[in-house]
Amino acid sequence: MPERYDAVIIGGGHNGLISAAYLARAGLRTLVLERRHVLGGAAVTEEIVPGFRFSVASYVVSLLRPEVIRELDLPRHGLEILPLDGTLTPVRPGEGPASGGGDYLWRVNDHGRTVRELRRWSLADAEAYEEYGQLMVEMARFIKPILGIIPPDPTANDPRGLMPVASLLRSFQQLPQRQQAVFVQLMTMSATDFLRQWFVTDPLIATMSASGIIGTYLGIQSPGTAYVLLHHYMGEIDGAFRAWGIPRGGTGGISYAIASAAQALGAEIRTEAPVARINLKGDRATGVVLESGEEIEAAHVLSSADAKVTFLDLLEPGTLPPEFEAEIRRFKFRGSSGKVNLAVDRLPDFTCLPGYGEHLRGAISFSPSVDDMERAYDDAKYGHWSRRPYVDMIIPTLVDPAMAPPGKHVISCFVQYAPYKLDPSLGTWDDNREAFGDAVIDRIAEFAPNIRDIIVGRQVLTPLDIERTMGLTEGNIFQGELTLEQLFFNRPVPGYARFRTPLRNLWLSGSSTHPGGGIMGANGRLAAIELLRSLGRKAA
Amino acid sequence: MTPTNGSYDAIVIGGGHNALVTAAYLGKAGRRVLVLEQREVVGGLLETIELAPGARVPRYAHTVGRLRPAVVRELGLKARGLSLAAPAVRVFAPQADGRAIVLRADVAETAAGLRAWSEADAEAYAGFDRLVRALGGFMSSLAEATPPDVAGPSLGDAIAGLRLGRRFRGLGTLDGRTILRVLPMPVADFVAESLETDALQAAIAWRGVRYAAMGPWSAGTTAHLLADAAGNDGGAAGETVVAIGGPGALVNALALAARGAGAEVRTGARVVAVTSRDGAVTGVTLESGEQIEAPIVVGGIDPKHLLVDLADPVAVGPQLRWRAGNIRTPGVTAKVNLVLKKLPVFPAAGGDESLLRGRILLAEGIDPIERAFDAAKYGQISQTPILEAMIPSLLDPSLVEGAPAGTQVMSVIVQYAPRNLRDTDWDAQRDALGDRVVERLGSVAPGIAKLVKAREVLTPLDLEREHGLAGGHPLHGEPALDSWFAWRPLLGHARYRMPLAGLYLCGSGAHPGGGVTGGPGQNAAREILADSRSRRR
């Protein structure tokens, strides 16, 4: 006789674990099934080089919802966020106000210092920075509730689903006109066009814009990239808990804190338990079959795997309504990011700011100009990895030394662009992995020439590797592109943005749902709340 | 006799087609209207010029198929000499391999022709055409509406909203979901959802980027395509309609309509300032120093020029002036006009002259359009610009009546050629661009260079200089998602009312945007009259 649960959750990434915690908290008998030997999905810590531990894929937290942290009491389960301070943008010699060995643009949390630094570049920009920051905080305050809303179906006849939108509209109308206009711009413009309204300093625009393209197959001048600029100000308004930094022990630290919370609330978690299929009776999900053949019965199946894996890989063909299946096939993934993890025996030495210093303790953004960023995208558009990519570098060991042997360091390099689909003339990603890794090192060496000499171990993660290892379709780190047509009531497909699926008792709770990807946890929480509501229960 | 000051109800700045439409409607409603055009002729970008003795060519815009039928009817344009002609072939897109994509007015014939390219596309084309028409139909309702007042919707807005809502529901759940999903999409993705042949995708997607500083992979270009398909008989193939006598004939009919309705039209009258007192307009000042008073001033010009250069900065206020200064006007389109000794030979047409009567498109694929766009991002003229050419004299021989027998004229829209060039300027590049365009035409019409008898190259800089268009943008503002509907040109000022009492916008910078539609002009006149009626009451 197979075991029976109230809810079985496919995938032990952060969203799956969060759903489990909320369901268990409401008294449901809950089981999480993770394919790999480690929990966390893309938020994992692994020892890649002996003695060196890496946040393999996802590497910073910025958006973890404060209500999740609070409601699941994550700090008590070991969550500790170590703040990162500042973003350094090294600039080529001759391209900044300073003469000599290259220049830099260095922004830190200390507003006064940043403004002084900006004055070196442009007095007008230094002045605008203040006004811009203020405006963004106000915008973030307005937009934040959207992340907690269950999206309506605008074509539905039942107006009740539109209520949250109506209240949103009302608060929109209460904004001053200038803020209304800026909000519309944030939703529709390119990051670069948006920023050019305030700034002229090229490396500043390039670096700020870069946050708008993380995980997307878009350039910084592509419409639709401005919105993400807001995310950087979300942390500002969370008061006491500043959710921007790196978790102690790597991003796996978050996953294990959530898992610990879920287990304390009564959820069971099994690793190395890959799900082969979702069982159905008619149009109702009844449980899952593991690859081992083991059957597990459950009243509800929640999948935190992405929409393609859930609907096209885990269900028998022909079980979905054809219209819905067509929409799922249409859902765009288009992974565009890679990751290079380095084990080093010394710190990188930057031409623009030689030696060790505070500047290495934050993010180091290889985004010297708008053109550099745009050309990196141009390569990717035509199926080539960026020859001179955008790299977002972090040296976690400077804030969390336990990640490497004493005196040594790990370096995390998020890289764009690495398009999942390469031009056929290039061969496969297996043929390109090392060349891509070399391109990243070359890019870093432009500004920190000692990089080649300090590397003792290197891991290159291509979108294909991300797909293979983490089960993320086309290596998309957000379980589906965060483009305008794939957001809110269109995520993952129009008419099914409320975590439900065409099959009864089958739910979707991963980043393929509203509000999208990143270590945010809103998806997993909202899906659990919606499931509990269908049972007439509150999320305790 | 020239009326004295105080005798006008409204002054319209600019004599482009939307300005004339507004003037005609205001005149018909009994308002005394004065149109002030800085050039010696009215019509703006709609103009027929004699480029060689007896050979006349559409100077800028060459098709007029999107003209709103209500405007044609209500202003009696047909009776005033407007005569339209539409070829059976809408698009002829010759390819490097000697074949061609042909889009016809007849959907079934188009599909049959596509069979040589792809069975699947031949099957899918009619369905795609239906979808574009359905979504375009909704866009056309949207185009007719005055955008809602976002700050404080009134009862009227609610009713208009309900009307649009009904139109939206009329789409049905499936198309309703589709339009919400596809509007912000890149047009490359939109066409690829239905069609597989790259050359066919490009021939359709081109209309999603025409006149825009965007490539087919830019988000929101589907909205631009669907706006182009809105109303009339666009569909997947798009409109190809010319005015007999060239676009100038449409302008003549509009000017006649305006004058017939009592409007006075002055050319060579350049407005340098909109005067105002206590937040309300009082009239305009001409370059000559002459002041003309009127309680209503309507800008048929682009909104950036109107708000930043002409209106009183104190009255506009620093914040709105800053916003207006940020209206994006990245012009990327040039125009090359040719007089040809005889009809060039296009081998891909296989001697079938009827194929050359539509829009002749050199946009060989999605990536080639995107690559042409890439150049513009870096301030360079594309080496292989996208060309939309027409030989209007095939449809309208009156254009070459006075020229030697066999003469044809060719009108070529050239993209991407950005207004702001790096390391060089347009005065140095004008002829090089002309050469490049003729050379590129030669790739599908060998020997065309030898047929050229006269040539004119109009760059974005020329548009800015001659027509005063900010950034040389023919649409008065980028047709992108950030300048759309309730926020075109600016959120809070999308209802044709500008920030000063009595100041209005009736040009392409207002909803529903650019193109030869008369839409902004008609909508603006409706709002102006509504305001003046409620004031009179």
Image: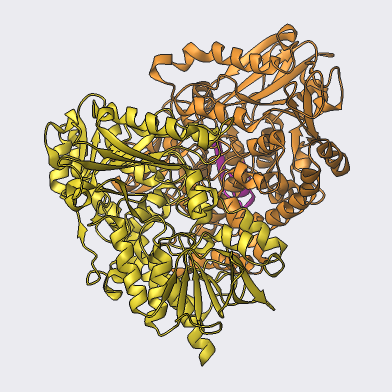
Q: Nearer the viewer, residue A132 or A69?
A: A132
Question: Taking A534 as reference, is A191 above or below it?
Answer: above
Query: Residue A307: within the magenta?
Result: no
Colour mode? Answer: by chain
- Magenta stretch, residue numbers: A18-33
Q: Which of B482 and B166 is in front in this view?
A: B482
Q: In this view of the protein, can residue B112 be seen by the observer? A: no
Question: Tell me, what hue is chain A?
Answer: orange
Residue A506 x %, y %: 44, 46
- Residue at 68% across, 38% down: A205
Residue A66 x %, y %: 72, 49
- Residue at 38% across, 46% down: B208
Q: Which of the 4 image quarters holds residue B364?
A: top left
Query: Residue A26: within the magenta?
Result: yes
Q: Nearer the viewer, residue B402 or B483?
A: B402
Question: Taking A356 as reference, is A5 above or below it?
Answer: below
Number of dots carrying numbers: 0
Q: Which chain is yellow?
A: B
Q: In this view of the protein, can residue A284 be seen by the observer? A: yes
Q: In which quarter of the image is the N terminus of chain B?
A: bottom left
Q: Nearer the viewer, residue A39 or A457?
A: A457
Residue A158 x %, y %: 43, 68
Q: Which of the 4 image quarters holds residue B164?
A: bottom left
Residue A73 x %, y %: 74, 46
